[in-house]
Image: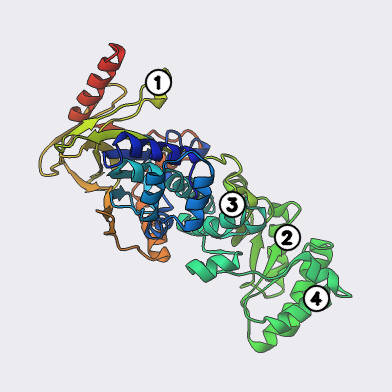
Amino acid sequence: MLVDFYELTMGNGYFQSGLRDKIVYFDVFFRTIPDRAGFAIAAGLEQIVEYIENLHFSEEDIAYLRSKNLFEEAFLEYLRTFRFTGDIYAVPEGTPVFPNEPLMTIKAPAIEAQMIETYVLLAINHQSLIATKANRIVRAAQGRTVLEFGSRRAQGADAAVIGARAAYIGGCKGTACTLTDMRYHVPAGGTMAHSWVQMFDSEYEAFETYCKLYPQGATLLVDTYDTLKSGVPNAIRAFQNVLLPQGITDCAIRLDSGDISYLSKRARKMLDQAGLTNCRIVASNSLDENLIRDLMMQGAQIDTFGVGERLITSKSTPVFGAVYKLVAVETDAGEIIPKIKVSENTAKITNPHFKRLFRLYDKESGKALADELCLYDERIDASEPHTIFDPNATWKTKTLTQFTVRELLVPIYQNGVCAYSLPSLSEIQKYCADQVETLWDEVKRFENPHTYYVDLSKALWDVKQKLLKDARQGR
């Protein structure tokens, strides 16, 4: 029942109009990249699979719909045995993706395709947004560990749990969210809040007690009172009195306020002078990729970043904007008829037809050169020269000779049966990191990134132009 109500009214309408079994094709794609970045990260597929595997209407659901006095009884009976029987193609989670290319294509009877729209968009929009933001933050940290700390600022319980999963895909090494660890095996960790320090008669007693209770990897929060005058000295004293006699040198302090750059440098010097060269410095407090990048440029002595609200809400750009658009219908004879949405806003004109998505790579460097959208029955042969062109400027072409090609949309469901083996979350994270490495540095720039082209094959371009011409002529 997590659907927009119009999916139910349309479903009932399709049922009564004889269109319930009409095969349709929908694409899921987005138009702009969050934070004006060079690419986004696809995520959310696993939750869509879980949703479809459990998709059904209960007796309680049907009773509620009957109470609305809108739906034909035969349609409600149809919903009793409703399940998804169509095909789904999608890019694997962790794939770098670009505007106007399908992240997912759904081929199914009209009612089924329409009924899954809301959840598909919800899953892809949320997790792709957070995975994309996390990847930016992780890249800004230049190899330092990034942890997701945002549960308490997330927009709801599901956003906290699933958001931490998406952040892990984007490259975060762990989370503060215990439930995400329990469900998805994202390593959860945490130490203390300021309240722990305040509960004791002295800051040192708080630190000493904590080190005795948790000697392995103890992290002490040093800014409850005065970071440099008491916090760091008391932490050093606790480490020396409790941990070092046990031969333990793995420890850390956390900075959560003040001038993080300045404090980290001073703290690093104090720790090193005390012989605690292995003690790590963790920084938190409203961080994002821009602040982290500035801290790195200033030479801040930080080993780990804990990032909360600006990651889990993607505060700078809180909407991903993926849409779900009809691109083709199928006749009873099996002919695929392309459909297009036309708008006075040219950015909202869709790419029609049932399509395939290919990524072309430079054979020598392994870097991605362009993506190409083709008709469903087209292939790209890497053994022959291939010409690509910018769909926004058809005169701008480039012929590739030394390249490899990979099809990005892979079968997820075939005739309602899952045909995809879901990878582990750690496998998705590694795949994401590997795929980001195939992008040129110019595409990965934070400011004014190079535009990565998503091209249309000549055949698909011709189909689109014909449909636009027909639309202009009112046909």
Q: Nearer the viewer, residue 454 or 340?
A: 340
Q: Residue at 16%, 41% (x, y): give it.
A: 380
Camera-near label (2 vs 1) is 1
Q: Nearer the viewer, residue 37 or 85?
A: 85
Chain-order first, disc 2 or disc 1: 2
> Which numbered dot is residue 312?
3
Marks 1 and 2: in contact by CB < 8 Å? Answer: no
Q: Is residue 380 left or right of residue 81?
A: left
Q: What is the x, y in percent for residue 78?
A: 36, 49
Camera-near label (4 vs 3) is 3
Q: What is the x, y in percent for residue 206?
A: 80, 75
**Residue under pointer 2:** 266
**Residue under pointer 1:** 343
Quick one: SS at disc 4? helix
Camera-near label (3 vs 2) is 3
Q: Residue at 29%, 39% (x, y): give it.
A: 25
The CA span between labels 4 and 3 is 30 Å
Callout 2, which amino acid?
A: Arg
Chain-order first, disc 2 or disc 4: 4
Marks 2 and 3: in contact by CB < 8 Å? Answer: no
**Residue under pointer 4:** 206
Q: Is residue 396 left or right of residue 60?
A: left
Camera-near label (2 vs 4) is 4
Q: Quadrant of residue 381?
A: top left
Callout 3, which amino acid?
A: Ile
The CA span between labels 4 and 1 is 63 Å
Q: Is residue 299 above or below residue 173?
A: above
Callout 1, which amino acid?
A: Ser
